[in-house]
Every structure is written in C-alpha cells, then in structure tokens.
Amino acid sequence: MTEVDAAVEHRLDNGGFVKLGACWSQREAEFLYAFAGTPAAADNTIGRLAWLGRRFDEESLALDAFASLPFSVAGGGNLIVGMDYQKVSARTDTARGAIAGRFDLANWDVSGVSRPEVNYSQSQTDDVTRRGLYSQLRLTPLEGLNLIGGARLSWYESSASDGLSGAALSAQKIDAKLTPYLGLTYDLNDSLTVYASHTAMFQPQTALGADGRPIAPREGRQTEFGLKGALDGLTLTAALFDLRDKNRARQLPGETAFTASEAVRVRGLELEASGQVAPDWQLAAGYVWTQTEYLNGPASGAAFSTYTPKHLFKLWAEYDPDTGALAPWSFGLGVTAMSSFSSSVRGVTVNAPGYATFDASLGYAIDERTDLRLNVSNLFDREYYTRVGSTSVFNFYGEPRNATLKLVRRF
C-alpha cells in the first residue's frame, strides 16, 4: 500500500479554522489459500480441499474541505460545514479450484499438497464516485445541556464491468440522499450525564441481484439512550439501543446472485461498572442483552443474526491489599459467560452451546519498581466454540488453558 496525505489549515481570529485535506492511495494484494471442501466424515476426515486465489488492485483519491466556526449567540456553540469527494477504481481477479485427498482434522498435515496453478478465470473492474455536503451544529442553550444536530447530502455513482471482456455488468446512480442525525447530553450533576442520539443510515451496495443490477441501498436508523458517570468510586455506563435496517445483502441459496433482505431490528441493553468497591477490592463487570429479529416477510419474528448471543456477561474481581502479611500479593479471578448461538447456511444449522470460562491471576510485588505476575486463561480448560459457520468452514474452538508469566521492571 502506498499513501500520500496532505492538509492545509487556516486558523481564524475567533478560534475557528478552515481545513482542506487530500489523500491518494494505491493498494495491491494477492492471496491464495485453501480450506475444507467437504463436511467432516464420522472418522473426522474431509475428502478434499477447496482453494481460492485472488488478485486485487485499487487506486483512490479523497478530498475533504470544511470550516469550523464557533459562536457565542444563544449560549454559544459551533458550526461545521463541509464537502467531500472520493473516486475509487479497482480491479479484482479471482480463481477457484479443488484438491482431492483425505485430510485428518485431528492430525492436520498438508505438507504433501502442491501449490495449485492459478489461472484467473474471473475478473471485475469497479469505478465508484462519492460526493457529499455535510454540516454539524452544536448548541449549549442551558447550563449542562448540549444539543448536537447535523446532516449529510450524498451523491453516489458506480459502474462495474468484466475485466476480461470489457462488457458492462452493472451501473448505479443515487442523487441527493439526505441522512440526518440528532443528539443531546445533559449533566444531571457533576458526576452523571444522560444522553440520547438518533442517526439515519444509508449505504449503497455493489452486490448484484438475479437481474444483474445492484440491489437496493441499505437504509436504516439507530436510536440510543444512555447514562454515563461515576458514583461512589465506580465508573458506570448504561445504554439502551434500537437499530433498524433493511436491504441487507443476502446471497440466494445455491446461486451467486444476492437479494435485499427484509427489514430487521437489533435492540438491546448494555451495562458496565468498574472501580473500587471496597478497600483493596477492584471490580469490573459488564452485561449485554441483544435481540435480533426480522420485522416483516416470511421469517417475521425470527432471529436474523443467530450468531449473536442473546446474553453476554463478564466479571473480573481483584484483591490487592495495601497492608498486612499479604500486602506484596494480588489475586484476581474473572468469568466470561454467554448464551448459545448458531449459524444457518443453505438450510443447515450449526449450533454452539452457551459456555462460561474462568481466568485467574496471581501477582507479587518484588519491590517498588518490580512486579511478577502469573495469568491463567481458561482455568478449567473448557472446550467451546467462539464462532460457528457452515458444515465445512468457520467453526473455531476457543483457546485451551494457557498461562503467561510476566516480569515488569519500571525505570
């Protein structure tokens, strides 16, 4: 990757500034890798490897100009107005193939597999141009109250063609799409602040439908309410979020074409607390509840992101006495737990049960500037999946029990 950046900034007498930035980049990449080409048989072997080779070349130019203008009217605030431009040209060459053989997943050995001959039989060139106008306004009409609002007006053009024949594959043009956002924060006191935000989303897509045209842009919005602050030595965060999204690209079963998915919703709750809960005791805890569902269509009410666990909990407690016979020592214990999750590909579902893993630490202060610490992860050597995919790929075990001994000397 080669990148060249340049920026010019002019400061104004009132504390504002005008800035112009430019970035040119050129990226090249080439890779070749193989993966399981069949599900595992009863004896834990697969019957072939599938391989993918790809060559990628991209050139990009991005320009951005904006002014930041503070003002003192109506309690004071700041106004940002700007425009940006991006032009991206890319070419992607692709090759695929398979390698026959018997491969044991428990005793993996591919030392005898020769590098396949790669002939790029597929190629696509893409040209994308984005232009936009944007603004942001910050106001402080009352003490402790901050209002934030803004919007972006976007223009988008893209075209794709066959890199081998030059034949046109698709084209897309979107004019003057408006995406606003709003937010506020309010200080309840010197320690606690509540906030709210609402943001519209818009993302053109390059995936092609069965008719050979790009599918509709992804659109949606995200709303969040929360509380942040400190209370009795603890740092606290609480948030409720609701995200709605439609036209997410989804590949049609058994085809290379995509379709725009039905409207979906992700909503949930996040809670975090950390700090000193008692003399010599430190605590860090967090909990996330997430629910995903289709809002319409034949799957209405069903979870759309089955690989997202509904419950995730983390807790870490550490005892680090300042006085007494145990003063040089520190002791830590933590747990990470999550509910079950799954993945469905072409009508086949792979399930991962919920699990909990424990971590521990033991520290010793040799002197004021030297510490020795032993950390043990997955203390009880729990076997679990961190991710599941299909019957042949993307099923990953979590790390088995492991330990790290660290000596730290401060100078």
Image (cartoon, rainbow, N blue to C red):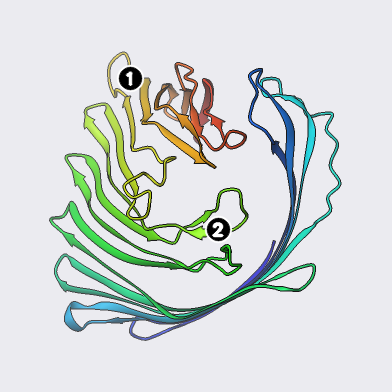
Q: Residue furthest top?
A: 325
Residue 165: percent from left, percent from top: 79, 70
Q: CA distance from mark 2 to mark 1?
A: 62 Å
Figure disc tally = 2
Horizontally, is 142 left or right of 352 in the view? left
Secondary structure under badge 1? loop
Graded by Cα atoms within 10 Å as few (under 14), some (14 to 19) or many (20 or more), the crowding at tag 1 reads: few
Residue occupying image coordinates x 47% and y 19%: 382
Residue hosting label 2: 258
Residue occupying image coordinates x 31% and y 40%: 288
Question: Mark number for residue 135?
Answer: none
Mark toward the viewer: 2 or 1? 2
Residue hosting label 1: 327
Horizontally, is 117 left or right of 371 in the view? right
Asked if the residue under mark 1 is in contact with the one under mark 2, i.e. CB atoms within 8 Å, the reply is no
Residue 210: percent from left, percent from top: 58, 62
Q: Amino acid at mark 2?
A: Phe
Horizontally, is 213 left or right of 337 in the view? right
Residue occupying image coordinates x 47% and y 79%: 132
